[in-house]
Amino acid sequence: MTSQACSFAVTVPSVASPLRRHRNLHVVRAQVEPSEKSIEIMRKFSEQYARKSGTYFCVDKSVTSVVIKGLADHKDSLGAPLCPCRHYDDKPAEAQQGFWNCPCVPMRERKECHCMLFLTPENDFAGKEQAITLDEIRETTANM
Ligand code: SF4
């Protein structure tokens, strides 16, 4: 399987993987950062959807930040917030199809977010927050 070129991509191994595996988040960053506007849109969306779904952000906010930026990048490049934690053979076709546009179908149907953006309270790595600021996103991804 191949991944098309993009400026920002995130790969998270699997659903409910331990945080130690999230240390293995594969973050591929090129020269282009997602636009500030799209980061803000996806930040607000993430806060609202966490509240709506009764889920929480990861105790490690850098996980949250990286996923939000990955979603923002896809919003910029594809026009839709395609899940940034997967590989796709054809990203535009996937974005058009919609199954993996955030919130994806597994999240909507079963509260399964393999990116660890939205964690149910019983998840060992769920924090207590449903909010993240733009400054937090900037600070936690500054050295990536
Ligand atoms: Fe990816 Fe689905 Fe999580 Fe959104 S809800 S970040 S699309 S796994």
Image (tube, rainbow, N blue to C red):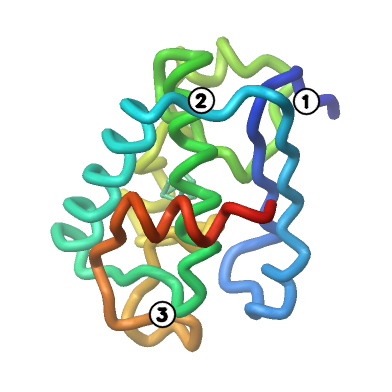
Q: Dot 2: few (<14), some (14–19), or many (≥20) neighbours within 10 Å?
A: many
Give the quarter of the figure containing the N terminus: top right
For the residues carrying marks 1 and 2, which lies nearer the camera in this image? 2
Determine the residue positioned at 66% across, 37% down. Answer: 9
Q: Is mark 2 on a helix, strand or loop?
A: helix
117, above or below 98, in the image: below
- State the separation of the CA atoms marked 1 and 2: 13 Å
The image position of residue 123, as x and y in percent, is: 44, 83
Q: Dividing the picture into quarters, in which one does residue 110 lie?
A: bottom left
The amino acid beneath tag 1 is Ser
Q: Is mark 3 on a helix, strand or loop?
A: loop
* Residue linked to disc 3: 126
Q: Dot 1: few (<14), some (14–19), or many (≥20) neighbours within 10 Å?
A: few
Pick whichever, 73 or 106, lies toward us: 73
The amino acid beneath tag 3 is Ala
The image position of residue 102, as x and y in percent, is: 39, 38
Q: What element carries label 1?
A: loop
Tell whether label 3 touches label 2 (CB within 8 Å): no
Pick whichever, 31 or 8, lies toward us: 31
* Residue linked to disc 2: 74
- 93 vs 68, left or right, is right
Q: Dividing the picture into quarters, in which one does residue 104 lie?
A: top left
The image position of residue 96, as x and y in percent, is: 45, 13
Q: Dividing the picture into quarters, in which one does residue 143 lie?
A: bottom right
Determine the residue positioned at 57% across, 72% down. Answer: 16
Mark earlier in primary sequence (1, 2): 1
The amino acid beneath tag 2 is His
Determine the residue positioned at 55% across, 51% down. Answer: 66
87, above or below 116, in the image: above
Give the number of callouts. Answer: 3
Q: Residue 3 carries which label?
A: 1
Q: Dot 3: few (<14), some (14–19), or many (≥20) neighbours within 10 Å?
A: some
